[in-house]
Amino acid sequence: MKRAIIATVGTAAGLAALLQYKSDRPVQGSRVAVHPFSSGSPAGHSSAGASGSTAMTGHPPGGGAGDGTSQQFTGTDVVYKYGDIQLQATITGGKIAVISVSRESDRDAHSQSINSQAIPILTREALAAQGISFNVVSGATYTSDAFAQALQSALAKGGK
Amino acid sequence: MTSVVHAEAVMGTVVTLDLRSEAPGHHTEQAIGRVIDWLDWVDATFSTYRRDSEVNRLDRGELRLADSHRKVRDVLARCEELCVLTDGYFDSWATGHLDPSGFVKGWAIERASQMLTEAGVGCHAINGGGDVRVRGEPAAGEKWRVGITHPFRSDTFCAAVALRDGAVATSGLYERGLHVVDPRQRRPATDLAAATVIGPELAMADAYATTALAMGRRAPDWLADLSDHEALIIDPIGRWWETEGFKSYRVHAAPSHA
């Protein structure tokens, strides 16, 4: 069974995010934890679902949040049921400013319609997790698992 | 108010927990862990994708109902009630095989929300693949703002609602395509593109959203008669209809016509 965990810890004042991921598939090793945003992350707020495995931790280049610089990270291709996706995360001042789908390939027409619907929804939800938009999005998110992998991959590059 | 967000791939989707509290700590992590354990158990027991789940063993006649877990019997009894309540449109045998998924996800998340409340995290939102349960306030004096994904223009929302305690379930074609079967016609339901139901708790809101999609053109009359539930439905050419009370949840303008 594949399993993805994304944990974000944020405060009203600023944002500190922790993104964790583990998978039976050797995508980025069996389990990776990345701290793409370093500022003000309260200790001990990592996700509980991750217990029992060893975490690798990365730190953001250039000192992390609040410095106003913008950096772009592109993840590796993630193959899922309906094609491949590759995400690009732009991190400005320690926040995910833009997540864009930098590549998606499709196996058939059905996948095309699924991808064109699914990915923008999921992208927006990832941004929403930082309080940019809604608190919650109602409407199915079938390809979230692949999305989580692709996002993790993009952010992992920011953490190295 | 601090937010701890945890997303977990479970039950064939991603479940996101957003816990709000003044001082999150060990108890918050423990609560998340217990919720994930619960959802894993539900998945292992009720999944139609796992050959050895109790539901699949019941379907194949390898397990007698009397020998199944108490919660499995409870869920199947609730599904039977729903079948009666919905004039046969909510049918866990619609595909020819036992599939209570239309009830199980909402029911499992509802229980997860209770678990978080019992653990002292009374302010939270749980999103199970687009079906949402919220409690308390995301911040002092605020309501949870829930965006409802547009059924065919996925870069936009078709509506936005705000609430403190309650559930917002959306059933639609979306990514999963034609997954709701009209049990009467024994074919995929295609009259509606999406149905969103707001109610006091997620088990019923989720089941009613699925029911509305299966009902198609009959859905407005049926939804209008439900007590304690409000609904918005959209058909495949973009026409929409809402119950009178749905308006009171809206935070933005009405959805535009496609």
Image (cartoon, rainbow, N blue to C red):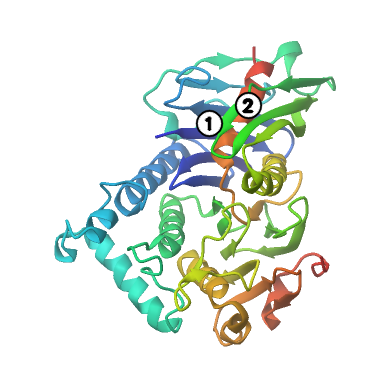
Q: Chain of mark 1?
A: A
Amino acid of disc 1:
His
Q: Are marks 1 and 2 on the same chain?
A: yes
Q: Chain of mark 2?
A: A
- The residue lying toward the viewer, choosing from A92 and B28, is A92
Residue A147 visible in the snapshot: no
For residue B130, what is the image quadrant? bottom right
Q: Residue at x 64, y 21 (%)?
A: A76
The crowd level at tag 1 (other Cα within 10 Å; few <14, some 14-19, many 20+) is some
Q: Position of residue B236 (x, y in %)?
A: 70, 68
Amino acid of disc 2:
Ser
Q: Residue at x 71, y 22 (%)?
A: A74
- The residue lying toward the viewer, choosing from A151 and B178, is B178
Q: On the image, numbered disc 2 is attached to which residue?
A: A41
Q: Residue at x 57, y 71 (%)?
A: B213
Q: Identify the secondary structure beneath mark 2.
A: loop
* Rendered position, B172 above or below A74: below
The crowd level at tag 2 (other Cα within 10 Å; few <14, some 14-19, many 20+) is some
- Mark 1 and mark 2 in contact? Answer it, CB < 8 Å: yes
- Residue most extreme to the front: A108
